[in-house]
Amino acid sequence: MNMSNRIKLAAILGVVLLAGCGERPPITTVQLGFRGTGMEQNYNPRLQEKVAAANQVGAVQPAADPSGPLAKDIYQNVEVLSDLSVGEFVRVMTSMTEWVAPAEQKDCTYCHNIEDMADGSKYTYKVARRMLQMTRDINSNWKSHVQETGVTCHTCHRGQPVPSYVWFQDPGSGRENAFVGTRAGQNSAVTGLGITTIGHSSLPYDPYTPFLLGSLPIRVEGETALPTGNRSSIQQAEWTYSLMVHMSNSLGVNCTYCHNTRAWASWEESRPQRATAWYGIRMARQVNNDYMVPLTDVFPAKRLGPTGDVAKVNCQTCHQGVYKPYYGASMAKDYPELQRARPLPEAAVEALPADPADPAAGASAPAEAPAAVAAPVAEAPVRGPAPEGQARSG
């Protein structure tokens, strides 16, 4: 083949390849803050169809009569829902069957011994009881994050016994050969851990252990242009980036959903969503430490991770690709039975032991999140996957 024919063939192949990836679908752009600062989010409606299908509100049972005898006076071994009437109690149990039980089962036997419904020997029975306590705790004591939208079992489970998005600890942590170098939690093919929300990047793929189980500092940025006491390293910053990428992918947004690009660290110039996310991180820590980790010995070995740890939650567990679960639609408002809870003492979460591979230094977070100030942008209702903001087509 002479040179001329080779050039023609290369040109034809190039056209074919470009035709295959040259799609320019209609893009929905949502302005989130000041124009010119890059505070916008672009959405491809075609790619959002799958995400929208996964964020449909679950079935809601007809409301029950709150009057009448209490369930604890009629049924045996009722502890968490002891304040519900029989009608309310049966309604919650029926709903949980739809929300959590396996598709091939969908009946009470997933948690109960059908010959003795009060028998609490099944591990699913014990876990479900603790999860009901957790749900009530979140709805009552974490309004700083869930607001009035709240959560139900369906928020995470979506009709299956194990939520689609959970995580286990990195099995390679602490087992690296220092003689040949440390991978710092990076650049390793990981399968079956449920850790898929850091954009398939080379960043550390388990930012959840230090930040959503432990309480190591997340912010590593210095407040001055010169090194005046900030000993945080680039390696530590990579862990922060990994958590931020996870949050971005989990909510289906980019960094400007919370941050102002002209002043990333400034709370005063951030959107209110940043404060909501701040509380969400702390809520995830409490859920993992107060509810999930204590259940480790309850779960069978087949439900534990490579290191024997229990499945835990992160942002993706509830959000599943959208800025608000179900795009902000509330199931919890239809279930007052899951709203009642006595305030629980806030558990102290100890930091993990210092590890050179972990972000063990940096400025600590404030005791309470500073108030974020919304950028002056007109709010307009947006249908579909776009978050709050001013939408336009492009």
Image (tube, rainbow, N blue to C red):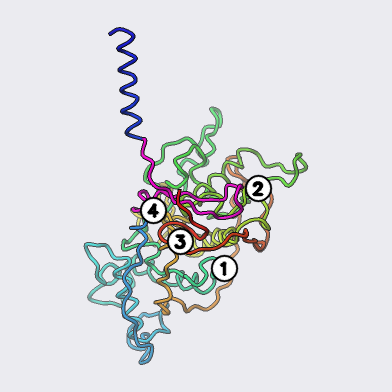
Of residues 309 and 221, the one drawn nearer to the viewer in this rendering: 221
Q: How crowded is mark 1: few (under 14 residues within 10 Å), some or many (20 or more)?
A: some
Badge 4 is on which residue?
A: 304
Real-space CA distance between mark 3 and mark 1, rounded to the nearest whole angstrom:
24 Å
- Which mark's residue is nearer the viewer, 3 or 4? 3
Q: Badges 2 and 3: C-beta atoms under 8 Å apart?
A: no
Q: Badges 4 and 2: C-beta atoms under 8 Å apart?
A: no
Q: Tell me the magenta residue range.
A: 22-51
Q: Position of residue 325 (x, y in %)?
A: 43, 62
**Horizontal relation, residue 150 to residue 367: left or right:** left
- Which mark's residue is nearer the viewer, 3 or 1? 3
Residue placed furthest toward the bottom: 68
Badge 3 is on which residue?
A: 382
Residue 145, compared with residue 226, is above or below; it is below
Q: Residues within 10 Å of mark 2 (few under 14, many from 20)?
A: some
Q: Quadrant of the N terminus?
A: top left
Q: What residue type is labelled 1?
A: Ser
Q: Position of residue 121 (x, y in %)?
A: 32, 69
Quadrant for residue 156, please give it. bottom left
Residue 144: mark: 1
Q: Which of marks 4 and 1 is nearer the N terminus?
A: 1
Of residues 55 and 36, the one drawn nearer to the viewer in this rendering: 36
Q: Which of marks 4 and 2 is nearer the N terminus?
A: 2
Q: Badges 4 and 1: C-beta atoms under 8 Å apart?
A: no
Q: Badges 3 and 4: C-beta atoms under 8 Å apart?
A: no
Real-space CA distance between mark 4 and mark 1, rounded to the nearest whole angstrom:
31 Å
Of residues 346 and 46, the one drawn nearer to the viewer in this rendering: 46
Confirm whether the magenta stretch covers residue 211.
Answer: no
- Which mark's residue is nearer the viewer, 2 or 3? 3
Confirm whether the magenta stretch covers residue 50.
Answer: yes
